[in-house]
Image (cartoon, rainbow, N blue to C red):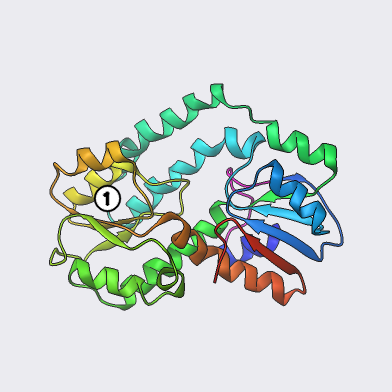
Amino acid sequence: IMGIALKLAGQKKIPEDSEIYLHGENIKRVLFGIDINVSELLLAQKLKCDCVIAHHPLGNNAVLNFYKIIDKLASIMIKNGIPEEKAWRSIESLKNSLKIANHSRNYTHIPSITKKIGMPLMNIHNPLDEIGRRIMQETVNNAKTEKVKDVVDALYTLPEFQKALTEIEIVIGSEEGDARKTVVAHGAGTNGGYDIAKTYFEYGFCVVYIHIGVADYLKLKNEKGNLIVSGHIASDSVGINPFIKALEKEGIEVIKISGVYC
């Protein structure tokens, strides 16, 4: 199952934020949710599932090494022409804050319980986010956007955004803002916060985040640029749905919960 996700994402190894917590065999029915906790493991037992798949990290190394995946934010910046030194400096604060937070985490909680009840469990985060980022970026590129409103219209051609309860919002800037250079800053653990958006603004990019914290938003309001927020669950689903179709093609039944739709 992990191999299918890696192949779709064009990746050769399991990234730091994804993990198999308890292996299983002969998997024919899975419970799949963006967020999984102990109650969902028990639900999977009741539904006679062979495995539970979460999108977000659940513990162990996927949680403790999550900060390392932030490097991909810098890689995306560099691919878009941001100078390397500037890109790496832009991720320092976010990466360090995530690393420091590890000391407060009970990283064995869910993995220890899944082993006690014998329910195979895994999470697949970055591969699916990378699939989603690629689809979103290609959708925007193919639309040959000129204004910010063109980016919003392009993203709304994807069914995940059409069916979402949240709306795609221009949270900084205006509909008429310049979007000839637009980057979907996704597929690297979490949103880039203030520092990365500010750097993109400095180089004339319209930025698409899937979500943003209030503190970062308030700081960015003082900067000149255009920021679109597409919505966390809808954006995650853009990458999750092709993977689900691939599982179903392999004859695996997928029971969808916790934000997985379409």
**247 vs 74: above or below:** below
Residue 231 position (above or below residue 97)? below
Question: Residue 40 at x, y = what percent?
Answer: 70, 49
Rendered residue at 57%/68% (across/down):
241
Can residue 85 be seen here? The reply is no
Query: Left or right: 147 with respect to 1?
Result: left
Where residue 220 sits in the image (x, y, percent)?
Answer: 20, 43
Q: For the residue carrying disc 1, how many other residues have a C-alpha within 10 Å: few (<14), some (14-19), or many (20+)?
A: some
With 113 as the anchor, is 79 left or right in this view? left
Given residues 252 and 67, the one toward you in this image is 252
The stretch of residues the image draws in magenta is 10-19
40 versus 133 height, above or below: above
The quarter of the rendered structure image containing the C terminus is bottom right
**125 left or right of 166?**
right
Instruction: Classify mark 1: helix, strand or loop.
Output: loop
Front residue (pair 185, 29): 29
- Residue 246 shows in the view: yes
Tell me the residue at 12%/49% (across/down): 224
Point 69% across, 32% down: residue: 109
> Magenta region's main secondary structure?
loop
Residue 37 location, quadrant: top right
Q: Position of residue 161 (x, y in %)?
A: 41, 69
* Along the line of sight, the residue nearer the viewer: 73 or 103: 103
Residue 128 percent across, percent down from the top left: 55, 59
Residue 158 falls within the magenta-colored stretch: no
Left or right: 206 with respect to 57?
Answer: left
Residue at numbered disc 1? 82
Q: Amino acid at mark 1?
A: Ile
**Which quarter of the rendered picture does the N terminus lie within?**
bottom right
- Number of numbered discs: 1
